[in-house]
Amino acid sequence: MLAYLQHLTFWDWLALGTLLLILEVFGAGGYLLWIGIAAAAVGVLTYLIPGLPWALQFILFGILSVLTAVFWWRRQRSAGKVSDQPGLNHRGQELLGRQFVLHEAIAGGRGKIKAGDSLWLVVGPDLPVGSLVEVIGQDGVLLKVRAATTTAA
């Protein structure tokens, strides 16, 4: 085993990196990605510096693995920060309280409004086309509306 370690080449590190990246594809949650990248980086360093002792290669691999794991941990932690645009992925929430003209009559409790360049399915009391409605809620892709009591601004 010691004889094998003393003759490690960049191919060994690239193979280890490739194996770790393949295993990452099967759902390791990002952990093997960064360790695989560390192994590939050691492979590149071993290619650039052919006489690198095997012990130093393993030390570099350990250091790079820890650095990339810390990088991943910090990135994941910062991803949980509160957005400055909390309604970005909740398009219907920005329509709450706004008034629209019915694009398609509400019949049987369902109709359509046009908000911007989009048509939205609405649920509410039966109303004819052209009626003014106010958005009062959202249920998935459906907007809940009621007849508006005031005129649109």
Image (cartoon, helix red, strand yellow):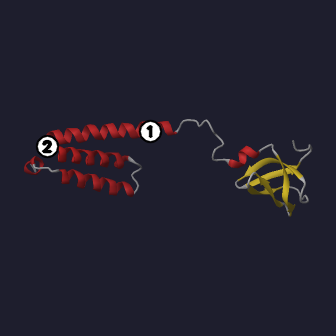
User: Circle 2 is placed at which residue position?
Assistant: 54
* Quarter containing the C terminus: top right
Mark nearer the N terminus (2 vs 1): 2
| 100, 127: nearer the viewer | 100
Q: Point out the residue furthest to the bottom here.
A: 108
Residue beneath the point at 11% across and 43% down:
51
Image side of residue 148 versus residue 29, left or right:
right
Residue 75 lies, in percent from the top left, at 44, 39
| Distance (Cα) linking label 2 and label 1 | 31 Å
Q: Report helix, strand or loop for mark 2.
A: helix
The residue carrying pointer 1 sits among few (fewer than 14), some (14 to 19) or many (20 or more) residues within 10 Å by Cα, namely: few
Image side of residue 108 versus residue 17, left or right:
right
Q: Amino acid at mark 1?
A: Arg
Q: Report helix, strand or loop for mark 1.
A: helix
Residue 125's quadrant in the figure?
A: bottom right
Q: Amino acid at mark 2?
A: Trp
Answer yes or no: do the residues labelled 2 and 1 have beta carbons within 8 Å? no
Residue beneath the point at 14% across and 49% down:
8
The residue carrying pointer 2 sits among few (fewer than 14), some (14 to 19) or many (20 or more) residues within 10 Å by Cα, namely: some
| 52, 26: nearer the viewer | 52
- Residue 75 disc label: 1
Residue 111 lies, in percent from the top left, at 82, 60
